[in-house]
Amino acid sequence: MRRRLRNAGRPGVAGLALSAADCALWDLKARRHDLPLARLLGTARRAVPVYGSGGFTTYDDAQQHRQLAGWVHEQGIPRVKIKIGGSCGTEVGRDLARMTAARRTIGDDAELFVDANGAYQRKQAIRVAHAAADLDVRWYEEPVSSDDLPGLGLVRDHVAPDVTAGEYGYDLVYFHRMAPYVDCLQIDVTRCGGISEFLRVAAVADAAGLQVSAHCAPHQHVPVAAATPNLRHLEWFHDHVRIESMLFDGAEPADGGDTRVPLDRPGNGLEFRADRAQRYRVS
Ligand SMILES: [Mg+2]
C-alpha cells in the first residue's frame, strides 16, 4: 500500500486510509491467533497512563472548571490539558487567565498541560511561557507551527515546560526531522501509517533519547501504547472517549489515571456496536 501511494502522496486522506488498513490488519491477525493485540505486539505494560484533554478556548470558565475537576477530582487523572492560543494567538491575556483558572481547579499536585495548536509567533510563545512560570506548566504543545522546526527548537531552549509536537506526522521521515527540535514526539496511529509505523516512529524517538505520546483516538491506541517501552502517556481526548465508549463495547475507563490494557480478549478488545451506530448512518 505504501508503495502504491507514491504518486498520490502520503499525507491526507491516503495516509488515513493506509493507517486504518494497517490497524485493521493487526487486529485481524491477533483475532485469528486468538491473542490480545498487545500480546501479539509485545506487551511492555498492563496499564497505559493517560491525560485528560479538552479545555477548548470556546468553553466558558464554568465549563472548563467542570471538565477539569471531573478528571482530576472525580476520576483521579493527575494530568490535564487545555487549549490556548485562541483567535490565532491574539488573546494572550485570556490564555493566561484560563491557565490560572485551570491551575486553581486542579490544585497543586496535578500536572497542567497546554496546547497552542501553533497559534503563537516564536518570541510570543516564549513570553507566554515566562508569564505563566508560576503555574508550573509541564507540557507546551505546538507553541508555534509544527512546520516551523527551528521555531520549536528555539522555544524549547528558552522555556521550562516540555515542548511537544508531531500529531500531523504522516510518515517516518517527518518524525525523524522533528525529533531534534522537541522534548517529546506525539504520534497518531490513525494518521502516521498505523501500528506498523507507530512502532517505527517510537524507535526513531528512542534513538534520539525521546519519549512518545499517543495523540487522540485513545482506545485505538491502547494496544500499541502498551507495546511501546518509551511511551509517556496517551491523550484521553474527551470527545473521542465519548464516541468510542458509545460505539464500541470494551472501551475501558481511565479511573486513577491509567486505562487497563485488554489482555483478556482477542484483538484490540473492542466490539463495534452496529445497533448504536445505525442512527448515524448517512447512506
Ligand atoms: Mg494538539
Image (spheres, rainbow, N blue to C red):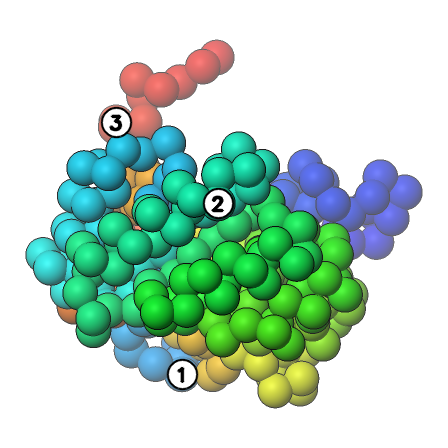
**Disc number placed over residue 34 in the picture, else none:** none
Q: Earlier in the sequence, mark 3 or mark 2?
A: 2
Q: Which of the 4 quarters of the picture holds residue 207?
A: bottom right
Q: Are marks 2 and 1 in contact (CB under 8 Å)?
A: no
User: SS of the residue at dot 2?
Assistant: helix
Counting from the top left corner in percent of width and height, residue 220 is at 42, 54
Q: Which residue is mark 3?
A: 275
Q: Nearer the viewer, mark 2 or mark 1?
A: 2
Q: Is residue 256 left or right of residue 161?
A: left
Place of residue 19 in the rendered image (x, y in percent of width and height, measured from the top left): 61, 51
Quadrant of res 218: bottom left
- Mark 3 residue CB less than 8 A from any atom of ligand 1: no
Q: Considering depth in this image, is 1 or 202 the residue closer to the camera?
A: 202
Q: What residue appears at the point 40 percent right and 37 percent down from the top-left corner? A: 57
Q: Amino acid at mark 1?
A: Ala
* Left or right relative to 139: residue 257: left
**Tag 2: residue type?**
Val
Mark seen at residue 92: 2
Within 10 Å of the Cα at label 3, are there few (<14), some (14-19), or many (20+) other Cα atoms? few
Q: Residue at x 35, y 69 (%)?
A: 134
Ligand 1 closer than 8 Å to label 2 CB: no
Is 199 left, or right, of 221 in this rendering?
Answer: right
